[in-house]
Image (cartoon, helix red, strand yellow):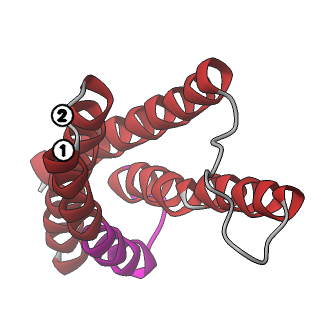
């Protein structure tokens, strides 16, 4: 029992560390490459509208980190026996599904263009997916206790 709690706590800390890594990677990418430019501009849209769409997409990407942060913090609290509930299990399943979709997209990007950034992105989503599966397993074991 205590082993499950210890493992969940470690997994939660690793998830939080990887979220921090992903945020830093996003910020560095924005600083180095700037805001992504879409060329050619789709017919019927102005450059300003395309820029707004790109900025909104970047903001939604940042919002997507919130469930990962939630399960990281909730996992630590559950491991310390300070919290109950099953919402973090549902979020873990949702994140597993998103990771599978992201792995498929990462493989597609890697097949189209083999470069270091695509390899790093694919490794990131594969590791995330494996962590969420393991997290779910330990959190479910603790919930059954």
**On screen, 122 above or below 21?**
below
* Quarter of the view holding residue 113: top left
**Residue hosting label 1:** 110
- Bounds of the magenta segment: 80-98
Question: Which one is in front, 70 or 140?
Answer: 70
The numbered mark at residue 145 is none
Question: Which one is in front, 51 or 12?
Answer: 51
Q: Can I make out residue 5 in this image?
A: no
- Measured as percent of width and height from the top left, residue 124 is found at 27, 40
Q: Which residue is painted at 78% across and 78% down in the image? A: 44
Q: Magenta span has 85?
A: yes
The numbered mark at residue 114 is 2
Q: Which residue is painted at 39% across and 59% down in the image? A: 78
Q: Magenta span has 103?
A: no
Question: Which one is in front, 133 or 88?
Answer: 133
Instruction: Give the structural element (helix, strand or loop) at label 2.
Output: loop
Main SS of the magenta part reads: helix
2 and 1 marks in contact (CB < 8 Å): yes
**On screen, 100 above or below 62?**
below
Instruction: Give the structural element (helix, strand or loop) at label 1.
Output: helix
- Measured as percent of width and height from the top left, residue 19 is found at 46, 40
Question: Which one is in front, 84 or 129?
Answer: 129
């Amino acid at each position: 029992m205590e082993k499950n709690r210890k493992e969940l706590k470690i997994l939660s800390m690793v998830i939080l560390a990887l979220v921090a890594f992903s945020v830093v990677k996003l910020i560095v990418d924005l600083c180095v490459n700037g805001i992504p430019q879409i060329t050619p501009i789709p017919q019927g849209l102005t450059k300003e509208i395309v820029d707004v769409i790109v900025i909104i997409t970047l903001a939604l990407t940042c919002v997507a980190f919130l469930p990962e942060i939630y399960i990281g913090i909730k996992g630590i609290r559950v491991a310390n026996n300070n919290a109950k509930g099953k919402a973090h299990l549902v979020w873990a399943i949702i994140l597993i599904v998103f990771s599978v979709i992201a792995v498929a997209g990462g493989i597609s990007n890697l097949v189209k263009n083999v470069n270091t950034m695509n390899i790093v992105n694919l490794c990131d989503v594969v590791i995330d997916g494996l962590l969420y599966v393991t997290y779910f397993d330990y959190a479910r074991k603790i919930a059954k206790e």
